[in-house]
Image: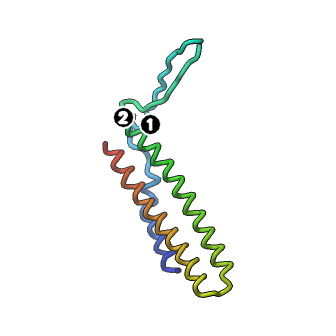
Amino acid sequence: MKRLIVFVLILAGLFGPVFAAPAPAGATDVFTACSHGSGGTTICSEAKKGGNPVIHALSVALEIIAIIVGFAAVVMGVLAGIKLTLSNGDPSAVKSGRDTLIYALIGLVVALFAQAIVSFVLTKL
């Protein structure tokens, strides 16, 4: 178990800068387009200059999925902790809790790598 935690921390240290990298130059250029509707209403939307709306929609969807996966990993970690706490030393219950925790961590790592790959591909388009 200690080896798994050390492994995850090493991965986070190695690949953490990938997720914290600044946006490419020009990606922060945002403009606001407004149109005046009937009845005096104004509708405004923001978009990147020269940006593709499909790529923007994919990146927003990716952010939402990452939030959901992170939340699910935290919930599964808490459930694993509850299983381990309530196991009372029963070997099968301890194994079940430990497996749940390991699978939650593996799922989180896989989701982070998937997000990194998709983000890399989207920035190259």
> Measured along the vertical axis of the image, is residue 30 above or below residue 67?
above
Q: Tell which tag, 2 or 1, sits nearer the viewer.
A: 2
SS category of the residue bearing label 1? loop
The type of residue carrying mark 2 is Asn
Viewer-proximal residue, 24 or 61?
61
Residue 91 place in picture, x, y as percent = 59, 87
Quarter holding the C terminus is: top left
Residue 62 place in picture, x, y as percent = 45, 48
The type of residue carrying mark 1 is Thr
Residue 28: mark: 1
112 horizontally vs 80: left or right:
left
Q: Residue at x 36, y 50 (%)?
A: 120
Residue 12 place in picture, x, y as percent = 47, 65
> Measured along the vertical axis of the image, is residue 17 above or below residue 33?
below
The residue to which callout 2 is attached is 52
The count of marks equals: 2
Q: Quadrant of residue 15?
A: bottom left
Choose the circle earlier in sequence order: 2 or 1.
1
Q: Residue at x 47, y 65 (%)?
A: 107
> Can I make out residue 103 in this image?
yes
